[in-house]
Amino acid sequence: MHTDGALAGFDCPTCGRTHAPDDVETTCPDCGDPVTPAFDPGALAKALDARTHDATGIDRFAPAIGFDSDSRVVSLGAGGRTVVDAPSLASELGVESVRIADEGRNPTGSAVDRELAVAVSVAAERDAERVVLPSTGNAARSAAAYAGRAGLESLAYVPSRTAFLEKAMTNVHGGDLSVVEGRYADAAAAYDSADTEGFQIGPDSPFRQLGAATLAWDLFGKQPNSPDAVVVPVGHGTRLAGFFAGLSALKEMERLDSLPELYAAQPKGCAPIVTAHEAEGEIEPWDTPDSVIGPLEIPDPAVGSLALDALAASDGDAVAVPDDDALAAAVDANATTGVEVSATGGVALAGATTLAEQGALGSDVSVLVVDPLAAAAESDILRSQLMSRGI
């Protein structure tokens, strides 16, 4: 990666040090805590303005995230503006407008494609032979696709409860799987204890945050009528942290007058970030995670501290919702908006409903709801919601 451009390095909020991109793989080399992207505002403005029309997806942001003509992003076309208006939801919530960022349109059906495209590109640039990570399933599939494209091997540790589709497509893309009996925490523990060789692209990878920053630039860069509030379903906090980094850079460049309020939504059965935010304290691992929404059942978020920072800096909030409310919100949105909203996205929709009921989202507020996953990946639990209604 070139270090004389828009990406200045990675900041560690804990110890205050800034590290050059080439000195970082996952967490802070000095204290071991999560790091977050730091941008040079002037250079970033030039990089964003210099985007060429022949590039698509996150390729348009290659110079902004540390890549030049000699170090290309491994691309499958992830990214772009994926927003759909949902006037029926705006009426239900009593807000000015609701838009859905339908990130399930990405190549492997997940917003994580933005993140893994960047992380795998860095691995390839550093001459890695293999990328490794723990995953609930979506990132395993994405990593396999991008690693295959880059000519690398991939190995993901996933829990046995991972959906068949994600496990199957990981293998179809040429990726290897270590399926660990139990839930995500068991897979993550097996990954940590195995000390597997390879370039690490797990949820604590700051390069994944760079990929998530492109979502902010796609949705807010040079766009009129930017949303006042953004509701994001949160597991590890990687997407929220990267999204906030991208927004903060836009504000520092004076491309945004003010930051939107960011809201994190989690299932009630596993809500460590919500609990820490409400207590104004540090994140404590969730003792007994229990949610049918697997991508968000993360008991010990890898970058939860960065997610808390994003909520505080944007004057946002966090909300936990029951699984049944999330599934109902997703199914109803599928029927009324035409958007194939996932159960994971349903957590954000149910969170938006709760926030509106609490008065946090008023009648003059424009709301963006991020759905990070294609509904087909969670069709079984969405269908179960219909069955509970006798349909």
Image (cartoon, rainbow, N blue to C red):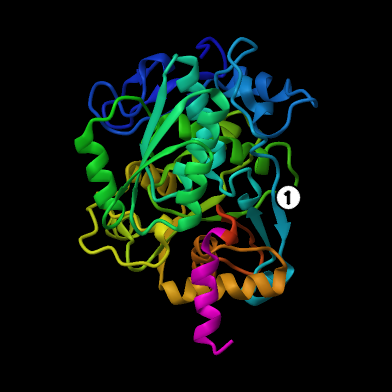
Q: Looking at the image, which residue sits at the far bottom?
A: 390
Please say whether residue 233 is one of the residues in the magenta stretch: no
Q: Position of residue 347 (x, y in %)?
A: 49, 65
Q: Residue at x 64, y 76 (%)?
A: 92
**SS for tag 1?**
loop
- Tell me the amino acid under the disc marked 1: Asn
Please report the residue visible at 27 percent of the width from the left and 57 percent of the height from the top: 182
Which quadrant of the figure contains the C terminus?
A: bottom right
| Left or right side of 190 for 369 | right
Q: Residue 25 at what x, y percent from top left?
A: 36, 23
Rate crowding at label 1 as few (under 14), some (14 to 19) or many (20 or more) other CA atoms within 10 Å.
few
Mark yes or no: residue 245 visible.
no
Q: Nearer the viewer, residue 153 or 331?
A: 153
Q: Residue at x 56, y 66 (%)?
A: 361
Task: Establish if 173 lies above or below 124.
Answer: below
Of 339 and 303, which appears nearest the observer? 339
Q: Which residues are magenta?
A: 377-391
Near-viewer residue (236 or 383): 383
- The outermost residue toward the right is 53
Q: Is residue 72 above or below residue 304?
A: above
Residue 353's x, y, as percent?
Answer: 54, 72
Quadrant location of residue 77?
top right
Q: Count all numbered tags in the image, as a single digit.
A: 1
- On the image, the x and y values in percent for residue 167 come to 45, 50
Q: Name the residue: 51% across, 14% down.
A: 1
Main SS, magenta residues: helix
Magenta residue check for 378: yes
Q: Relative to 72, is 330 above or below?
A: below
Relative to 70, 301 lies left or right: left
Label 1 belongs to which residue?
225
